[in-house]
Amino acid sequence: MSVIVAQGLTRTFGTGEAARRAVDDVSLSVAAGEVVLIFGPSGCGKSTLLALIGGLDRAFSGSLSLFGQDVGTLSDAELSRLRGEKIGFVFQAFHLLAHLSVIENVMAPALFSRHDRHEGEVRARAGEVLARVGLADRALSGPAELSGGQRQRVAIARALLHQPSLLLCDEPTGNLDRKTGEQIIELFAELHAELGTTIVIVTHEERLSRLADRTLDMVDGKLEAGSAP
Amino acid sequence: MRLRALGKMVRGELRRTRGPLVTAGFGIAVGVASLVFFLALGLGARRVLLGDVFPIDQVELEPKKTSAGLIALLGGVHEPAGIDAQSVERLKALPGVKEVFPKLRFRFPSMARGGKEILGTEIGTHEMVGDGIDPALVAGTVTGFRDPLETPGAECQSDADCKAPQYCERPSASPQGQCSDPVPALVSRYLVELFDHGVAPAHGLPPVAETLIGRAQGVAFELTLGNSLLGVARHGEQRKARVKVVGISPKAIDLGVTLPAEVVRRWNREYAGEAAATRYSSVVVRVGGAGDTGHLIDAAAGLGLVPHDTRARDVSVLISAVLALLVLVASVILAVAAANIAHTFRMLVAERQHEIGLYRALGASARDIRLWLSSLALVIGTLAGLGGALVARGGALIADWRAAKDLPDFPFKPESFFVFPWWLWLLAIGFASLFALLGAMGPARRAAKTDPAQALTRDR
């Protein structure tokens, strides 16, 4: 079963002569459990593509289906629910909330969950995922007290809180040094092996290709088949 | 978003941004404090002026006045028109009318003398004004207000035949009378206030405060019937009756005494003829609210009746106008405060673009974001409203304390110049919440429209 099906997906910024196609007629299908890497240099449109397939940006033309649901026909509430329940995001800039502790950051997605789970239950689950990424002992620390690699682990733990079916990662090692980046790559590999989560990673770092079942190259908004991993 | 999660987010935001939010809430609190203070003051003024001095919810109607001089010139005798029982019934049936009580005014000259028990010296008036009302109208509020001849005593020819404090109630030209208890009388608070703050100081007499009157219930005075400084009655003979004050009542005549209607009916018949005994001199109509007064006056005009006194309406209009002005000032303060809230929330939303974008990525819908910020504004508004109302209450207590301490005694000086009904507290909180919400509405809507993709990719 395909988790993502995009047909002629296009995203244009600006109008008239200033119009620029950041994503240009992209067709893509990602099967459940697949790990897909999209390579491309900065500004090629890969983050825009990730925002589209994560349902964060709806100003597209073409068609996009997530988990069999046509994104174009979903209401904002339905799409938000889909995002909250089935999709996890990992960003290059981590996007941790500085005023919250590590465990509270991991628990943040539960604030918007439609399921009435007791706070203790959510906290226990957050503790579990923190332990999984090796940060159980930093649960009460603030994000500012952590290294870059640790922050990205917290972001991954946050993305995993609801056991998402799809993990979308935007340059997950972009802000990390080589060694820390390797550790994060290892973590993704382990998580995929354990959970079978579908993962789409956009990056410009070739070293991530060893994770992938399939790689694609993005050039000037167009998606091309990449070299095999 | 679930309520528990919403509460958690709002609490977190209050902790995190308390400085700017307190400043924003302060403006609302000041506006609400002004609004509540002015409204409570207005209600207090209304209570005294329209409750005690010029009751607005009751109108005394009397037949339209004709020129006595012109009638006399045409050779007739001036006979007041009076109001018949049928007109009273029609007034009772009017919409908005709660109570109608007809009055029989004294249609004979009289004088009074007494008060030694309370004042230490006898005082009197050479011209006594009075009226009579149905005792049922004051049942439950005053005891002993009934026609004393309902239970007449022994037959008599003079007061000497009766046992004190009874007197011989013997109508003019009648060979025999009946011993009667003193006629019960009601006085108005207006009269008491006027005496205490006007007459008593001028004559070096002690004030007759309400409590003193209460203690002195039973004080009797002598009423001379059929004669006064201005002349004697056309019929009947001058004689004396005993009267006893039994209470203070808002239904009593402002200046004079109010007796049971049957007593006045008998005396009017004795001194002014049958018409004066059967036709009421005026009717007091109590309406549901000030708004009904206008309709009543219009309907009464159709019955040939006009208000005895329109000061209540004039005062009501004046108070309403002043109140409206003060409320306008308070509303301007609240509007400025709402603008301040709007500014604070705009800043907050601008600062939180990444955070809002992240929340959207984590599953928050646009509605969740709007709900979060609107709830935050509501909480600020509620707290500011409550705070403002408490400040107003504190200000009122201080004002009352200063007034009691520094203002000289004057007629109808109230214990408190303010009235704080329960709905005023709700109004304060409601207004504060409304203005806070109005201020936050725009920024909340803008926050809900935040493009998460852009917010998350923007440089931090």
Image (cartoon, coloured by chain):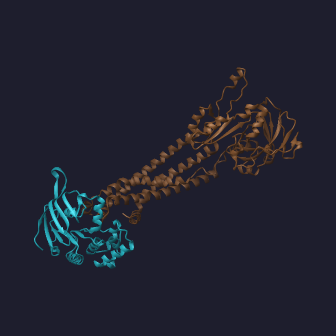
* Image quarter (top left, top right, bottom left or bottom right) of the N terminus of chain A: bottom left
Residue nearer the viewer, B268 or B317: B268
Q: Quadrant of residue B167?
A: top right
Q: Position of residue B129 (x, y in %)?
A: 74, 37
Question: Image point 75% across, 40% down: which residue?
Answer: B262
Q: Is residue B126 visible?
A: no
Q: Position of residue B37 (x, y in %)?
A: 53, 51
Color of chain A here? cyan
Q: Is residue A78 left or right of residue B151?
A: left
Question: Image point 25% across, 57% down: which residue?
Answer: A73
Color of chain B here? brown
Q: Is A140 placed above or below B165 here?
A: below
Q: Is residue B396 left or right of residue A19?
A: right
Q: Position of residue B350 (x, y in %)?
A: 32, 58
Q: Quadrant of residue A38?
A: bottom left
Q: Position of residue B3 (x, y in %)?
A: 40, 64
